Image (cartoon, grey):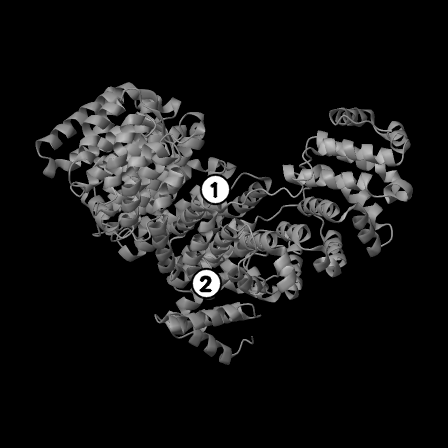
């Protein structure tokens, strides 16, 4: 694509169309942009547009398109073509920083993100001058430019907060500190001075405080991994200024908005985070500054209001106290009973109250409420922070704290009892307090794993939780109902089983509640209870105990999906999946209605898939329905195909990318259920599965390979008879996969199925070409993973076609090739093979080469006979060799970047492990002994003399053990 005005005009028109609400206009425009993004100059055209276009909407659209383009294509993935040509990469890196700094803020943010994506891959090695270019801009004095640099630095360095330690990381951080720490400190001091100079200028203060927030965030990132020497030497500058900023209050920076945090709140929140980081990680160095920070933050907490805009500040301030109070050498700061009472009274209790804003979220923004409350999402709430502070204080002061709070809990419950309809919030706070007091250690999987001995959980449950859940109406006091259900969920390991069983009908009943939070919690609680383990690893709650509730459980779960706001509720769908898994054959009578509802739901969500977890559990539930029913009645597979195939066809025709990998897995499961010929409906689809476009998406590869394997297992002869012209297409897929380091194992899965199941004559003409392709790949890039798969394949080939056929095909490619493969690959590498079935295949294959291949006994290959036997005994007796050369870092399939749907394995569509030599050989060691016995009968004396002269003593001892076990001897 030329950098011409005509192309800029075309691009402008298409970008406009991508903003059109009408999908008939929008989709073709998106497809067009996708089709041209591989062309040279495409990214430069976007950058030119966002710089020169007269229309702001086009500038913003071009910046977002550019950022997403970089996100999808910048990373260079091994074995895949480089999607951006080198000259474009150089031009982008040369122009993007100045362009970002001269752009308005909305566009600056997009370009800043793009720089950090490029930096993630190229900095520092391939973009060494990035830092210098950025630091030089600090001198400009223009805070629009400075903030652009700070924003970019923040998005570039924030990954230091969660990267694992490595030499590479340390080297990079050192490089950044050498270039950045001093200019950042000078900028910090200069900005603080400017704040006092412009103390009465509101617009100047806004810009300066935006800079201070970014500087404070950069401080956190650069100090996270370890305490850098520079910051230790300059701690006085940073901490004194941080402390004075914490206590600063400027009327010009206060906002009227009650919801949105202002600049002052955001800055103080970040400083609380920075102080907590130092108090936790570098307490010795930070000790001189700690008392004044504790005082400042305490005052902040006592004087800050209940408005939502202060939530982040308050929760970070409380988290600071929580991190300090559980460190042994700060214990003395909290020992005094008055201090503890004061913390409980002034900080913890007020921040546990259920505010009007929480009530609003509960009713109107339930998804966000659930995410915060159930999943503990990153947005720290005041309640969660207060809860953490209670846990922190209980570490050293469990008795006094429990005592203080017991009083509060009792008085709150008494207030509630006086007038429940008005005072229900008192009971909510009481339940929250009990929960935070009682829970010492918690995991997502098991709920509370350690509880406070001083709180009687069962008594509280019976007296205060059950009555709410037993009340006749499920819709009164929804917040208290949600609290009660959450209590069961959290303390499921502490509450006795009989109480849990009594709760199950109550929970099933609450699936009908109108409140989204209540019926979601009910579904989640049931799902968690169904996963609990009892003795000998069975589920704690059994299918028999659930028998009286099966019908009402299934009815209410599916009904809950029709309630407003829950049509794609992932918790309900997960509960459906878990119920199927627990109840097994008890659900068979309900399957016809269940599968109808699931397919209708599938059809509805396939129009616009937006909830990945919901979709995953829905497909899992479909797989479970199929498995459970067909296990009891294999003939039922036809009725499932009838129900599902119409929807599947629509998904495949409309190319619903998110669902295609799932459809292939369900189809594999159905096809594997057939015991006879492949039905014609599958054969009609077969040619479409070989289309190259399907194989372009990495997420499709594992399920497609499995589906083709199912075709080969169930209908190889049908394919050979009715679709022989498709065999080259099948081998074309193998050829594509084998060329990729990430997917070569999938290519071998396919090849092994072809060798194992296809009639020999149908693949005769292709066999030599297959081996030539494998050897080319071995020469070009030999990885451990490839070698392991290659060894399994040649041994499977040997089992299927005979050892002589293996020797002949190698030697037909190149004379003496067979000996080279034995000497250079099989003998030295066989120890690397892993997996029971894989080892068995190799053992049987090698046994055949040793005992059923005449050239091994009377040509120059004979010298390899003993080393090969020795290697086989090693495979049986030595530990597996799992070393991997340093230069091999396999990219995981899931790690490939971009927006493609990654492959999600369905647990309940799992494939049984298949053993191709199962019928033939039970014990490979005994099989070796019997085969050697047979060989020695055919040529007496030969085998014994070779063994006695050359085989190492230890291996010989093992071999004698095998011969004894098989009750045979050698002649």
Residue pictured at 25% horizontal, 28% vertical:
434
- Label 1 crowding class (10 Å Cα cut-off): few <14, some 14-19, many 20+? few
**Spot occupied by residue 153 in the image (x, y as percentages of width and height):** 47, 51
Give the answer, above or below, for where 477 lies relative to 341: below
Residue at the spot 42% in from the left edge and 34% down from the top edge: 278
- Which residue occupies the foreground of this view, 862 or 853? 853
Q: Secondary structure at mark 1?
A: loop
Quarter the N terminus occupies: bottom right
In the image, which disc is placed on residue 649?
2
- Foreground pick, 483 / 414: 483
Marks 1/2: CA–CA distance = 43 Å
Q: Are marks 1 and 2 in contact (CB under 8 Å)?
A: no
Q: Quadrant of the C terminus?
A: top right
Q: Residues within 10 Å of mark 2 (few under 14, many from 20)?
A: few
| Residue 71 drawn at (x, y percent) | 50, 58
Q: Secondary structure at mark 2?
A: helix
In screen coordinates, is 948 left or right of 450?
Answer: right
Q: Which residue is mark 1?
A: 162
Residue 169 x, y percent position in the rendering: 56, 43
Most extreme residue toward the left is 418
Residue 98 vs 473, above or below: the answer is: below
| Count of numbered marks | 2
Q: Position of residue 913 (x, y in %)?
A: 58, 42
Q: Nearer the viewer, residue 787 or 383?
A: 787
Would residue 873 appear left or right of 704 to someone viewing this image? right
Residue 867 quadrant: top right
Question: Which label's residue is closer to the chain start, 1 or 2?
Answer: 1
**View extreme (bottom): residue:** 6
**Left or right: where does residue 164 sit relative to residue 354?**
right
């Amino acid at each position: 694509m030329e950098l011409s005005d005509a192309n800029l005009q075309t691009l402008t028109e298409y970008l406009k169309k991508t903003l059109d609400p009408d999908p008939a206009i929008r989709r073709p425009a998106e497809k067009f942009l996708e089709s041209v993004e591989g062309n040279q100059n495409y990214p430069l055209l976007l950058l030119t547009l966002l710089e020169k276009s007269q229309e702001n909407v086009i500038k913003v659209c071009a910046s977002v398109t550019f950022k997403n383009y970089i996100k999808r294509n910048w990373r260079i993935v091994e074995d895949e073509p480089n999607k951006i040509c080198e000259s474009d990469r150089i031009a982008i890196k040369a122009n993007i920083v100045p362009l970002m700094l001269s752009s308005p803020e909305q566009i600056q943010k997009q370009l800043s993100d793009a720089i950090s994506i490029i930096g993630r891959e190229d900095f520092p090695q391939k973009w060494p001058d990035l830092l210098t270019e950025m630091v030089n801009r600090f001198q400009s004095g223009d805070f629009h430019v400075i903030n652009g640099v700070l924003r970019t630095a923040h998005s570039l360095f924030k990954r230091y907060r969660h990267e694992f330690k490595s030499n590479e990381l340390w080297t990079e951080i050192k490089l950044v500190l050498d270039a950045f720490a001093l200019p950042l400190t000078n900028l910090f001091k200069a900005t603080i001075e400017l704040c006092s100079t412009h103390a009465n200028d509101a617009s100047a203060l806004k810009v300066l405080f935006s800079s201070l927030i970014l500087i404070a965030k950069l401080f956190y990132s650069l100090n996270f991994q370890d305490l850098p020497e520079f910051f230790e030497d300059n701690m006085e500058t940073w901490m004194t200024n941080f402390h004075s900023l914490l206590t600063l209050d400027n009327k010009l920076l206060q906002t009227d908005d009650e919801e949105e945090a202002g600049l002052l709140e955001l800055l103080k929140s970040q400083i609380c985070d920075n102080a907590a980081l130092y108090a936790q990680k570098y307490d010795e160095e930070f000790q001189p500054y700690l008392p004044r920070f504790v005082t400042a933050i305490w005052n902040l907490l006592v004087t800050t209001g209940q408005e939502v805009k202060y939530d982040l500040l308050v929760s970070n301030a409380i988290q600071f106290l929580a991190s300090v109070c559980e460190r042994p050498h700060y214990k003395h700061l909290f020992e005094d009973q008055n201090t503890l009472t004061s913390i409980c009274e002034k900080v913890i209790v007020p921040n546990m109250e259920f505010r009007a804003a929480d009530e609003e979220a509960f009713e109107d923004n339930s998804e966000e409420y659930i995410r915060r409350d159930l999943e503990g999402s990153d947005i720290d709430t005041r309640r969660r922070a207060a809860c953490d502070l209670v846990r922190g204080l209980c570490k050293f002061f469990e008795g006094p704290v429990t005592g203080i709070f017991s009083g509060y809990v009792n008085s709150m419950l008494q207030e509630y009892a006086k007038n429940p309809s008005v005072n229900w919030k008192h009971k909510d706070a009481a339940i929250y307090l009990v929960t935070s007091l009682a829970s010492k250690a918690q995991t997502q999987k098991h709920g509370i794993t350690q509880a406070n001995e001083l709180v009687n959980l069962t008594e509280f449950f019976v007296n205060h939780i059950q009555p709410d859940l037993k009340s006749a109406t499920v819709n009164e006091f929804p917040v208290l109902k949600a609290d009660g259900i959450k209590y069961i969920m959290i303390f499921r390991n502490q509450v006795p089983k009989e109480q849990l069983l009594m709760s199950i009908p109550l929970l099933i009943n609450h699936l009908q509640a109108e409140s989204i939070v209540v019926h979601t919690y009910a579904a989640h609680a049931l799902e968690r209870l169904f996963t609990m383990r009892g003795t000998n690893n069975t589920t704690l709650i059994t299918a028999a105990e659930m028998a009286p509730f099966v019908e009402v459980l299934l009815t209410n779960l599916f009904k809950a999906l029709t309630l407003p706001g829950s049509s794609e509720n992932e918790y309900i769908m997960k509960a459906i999946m878990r119920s199927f898994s627990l109840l097994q054959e008890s659900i068979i009578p309900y399957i016809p209605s269940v599968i109808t509802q699931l397919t209708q739901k599938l059809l509805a969500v396939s129009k616009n898939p937006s909830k990945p977890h919901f979709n995953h559990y829905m497909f899992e539930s479909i797989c479970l329905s199929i498995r459970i029913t067909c296990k009891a009645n294999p003939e039922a597979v036809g009725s499932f195909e009838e129900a599902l195939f119409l929807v599947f066809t629509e998904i495949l025709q409309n190319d619903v990318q998110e669902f295609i990998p799932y459809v292939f897995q369900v189809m594999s499961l159905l096809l594997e259920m057939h015991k006879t010929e492949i039905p014609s409906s599958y054969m009609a689809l077969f040619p479409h599965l070989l289309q190259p476009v399907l194989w372009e998406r990495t997420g499709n590869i594992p399920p497609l390979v499995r589906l083709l394997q199912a075709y080969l297992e169930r209908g190889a002869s049908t394919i050979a008879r009715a679709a022989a012209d498709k065999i080259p297409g099948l081998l074309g897929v193998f050829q594509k996969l084998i060329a990729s380091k990430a997917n070569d194992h999938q290519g071998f899965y396919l090849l092994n199925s072809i060798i194992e199941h296809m009639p020999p004559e149908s693949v005769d003409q292709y066999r030599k070409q297959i081996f030539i392709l494998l050897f080319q790949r071995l020469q070009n890039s030999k990885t451990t993973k490839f070698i392991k798969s290659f060894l399994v394949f040649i041994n499977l080939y040997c089992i299927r076609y005979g050892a002589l056929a293996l020797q002949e095909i190698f030697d037909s490619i190149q004379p003496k090739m067979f000996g080279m493969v034995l000497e250079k690959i099989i003998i030295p590498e066989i120890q690397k093979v892993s997996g029971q079935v894989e080892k068995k295949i190799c053992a049987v294959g090698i046994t055949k080469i040793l005992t059923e291949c005449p050239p091994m006994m009377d040509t120059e290959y004979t010298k390899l006979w003993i080393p090969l036997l020795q290697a086989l005994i090693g495979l049986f007796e030595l530990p597996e060799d799992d070393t991997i050369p340093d230069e091999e870092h396999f990219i995981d399939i899931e790690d490939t970047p971009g927006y493609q749907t990654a492959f999600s394995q369905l647990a309940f569509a799992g494939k049984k492990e298949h053993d191709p030599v199962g019928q033939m050989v039970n014990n490979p060691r005994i099989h070796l002994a019997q085969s050697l016995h047979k060989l020695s009968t055919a040529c007496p004396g030969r085998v014994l003399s070779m063994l006695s002269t050359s085989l190492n003593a230890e291996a010989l001892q093992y071999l004698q053990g095998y011969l004894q076990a098989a009750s045979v001897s050698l002649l």
